[in-house]
Image (tube, rainbow, N blue to C red):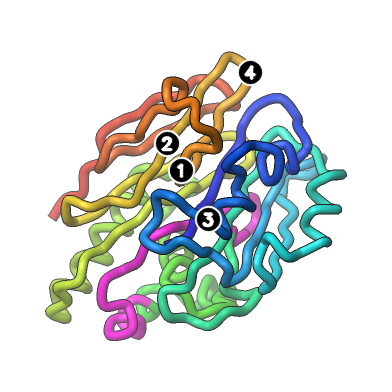
Amino acid sequence: MCRWLTYVGERIFLDSLLYHPEHSLVRQSLHSERGTVTTNGDGFGIGWYGEREVPGTYHEVLPAWNDKNLRSLSNQLASGLFCAHVRASSGTATSRANCHPFAHRQWLYMHNGEIGGYHRIRRALEAMIPDELYEHRHGTTDSEAFFLLLLANGIDADPIAATAKTVAAVLRVMRDHGVTEPFHMTSTLTDGHDVYALRYSNDDRPPSLYWWPTRERLIIVSEPLDSESDHWQEVPASSMLVSSGHGNTVVMPFAVEG
């Protein structure tokens, strides 16, 4: 599965997290320690907020460890809120359109995991995406489909309720099609101000997710960036971490009805 990180706080250069830590995200792309696969080389992406309300993004199909443009950009780009993702495909093509994070208006979204039986239920999931959003379906992943469903289910008004509604809808489609494979996910959703990070599965094996809060910053990661285990806190299963306005952070239970 994929590896990702989200940073919120004082402005820093992106390479300070992508490259500098002993177990940086770029190192994880080659030597993941807590994912289901060791190598995450099916492309990567970064998304960041700068002077505008809408985020910038950069995606590439090269492995992150082998892209000189990523090293150069991250050495120059500074942001107070950014996301980065290294991809291990679960069956869909390696293409820029399938690289995270996905962006729409002010929103960024990225995901690690898999919707069980996705290739059998893809058509049913896509049928739930309204036409005005489906025209923004550029790739083929379950992650992008989930993001567009989040938009359809009202993340502008209530991101937490929209996430619960979307997870419930996916589980319903899985049941209707007799899918027995599990639904695993961690994800980040942000509008440039608030961050919503989810750890969820419908079995007892959710993907890993950790966070490190300080007074100045918050880092959310698929796996720790260093070996100092005392400052990394594990996000419990079936929980959502919410950081409001680059400040207050809470971890709350995530419940799905039905």
| Quadrant showing the N terminus | bottom left
Tag 1 residue: 223
Q: Choose the circle earlier in sequence order: 3 or 1.
A: 3
208 inside magenta stretch: no
- Label 2 sits on a secondary structure element that is strand
Query: Of discs 1 and 2, which sits in the foreground?
Result: 1
Tag 3 residue: 31
Name which residue type carries label 2: Tyr
Distance of label 3 from label 1 (alpha carbons): 11 Å
- Label 4 sits on a secondary structure element that is loop
Front residue of 165/94: it is 94
Mark 3 is surrounded, within 10 Å at the Cα level, by few (under 14), some (14 to 19) or many (20 or more) other residues, namely some
Q: Choose the circle earlier in sequence order: 1 or 2.
A: 2
Residue in the image at 26% along x and 71% along y = 116
Residue in the image at 42% along x and 45% along y = 159
* Residue 107 visible in the displayed image: no
Mark 1 is surrounded, within 10 Å at the Cα level, by few (under 14), some (14 to 19) or many (20 or more) other residues, namely many
Q: Choose the circle earlier in sequence order: 2 or 3.
A: 3
Tag 4 residue: 216
Question: Within the image, what quadrant is residue 183 found in?
Answer: bottom left
Name which residue type carries label 1: Glu
Distance of label 1 from label 2 (alpha carbons): 6 Å
User: Does residue 175 sit above or below 238 in this rendering?
Assistant: below
Q: Position of residue 133 (x, y in %)?
A: 53, 71
Distance of label 2 from label 3 (alpha carbons): 18 Å
The answer to whether residue 148 is left or right of residue 99 is left
Tag 2 residue: 210
Do the CB atoms of the residues marked 2 and 4 lie less than 8 Å apart? no
Name which residue type carries label 4: Glu
Q: Which residues are magenta?
A: 101-125
Distance of label 2 from label 4 (alpha carbons): 17 Å
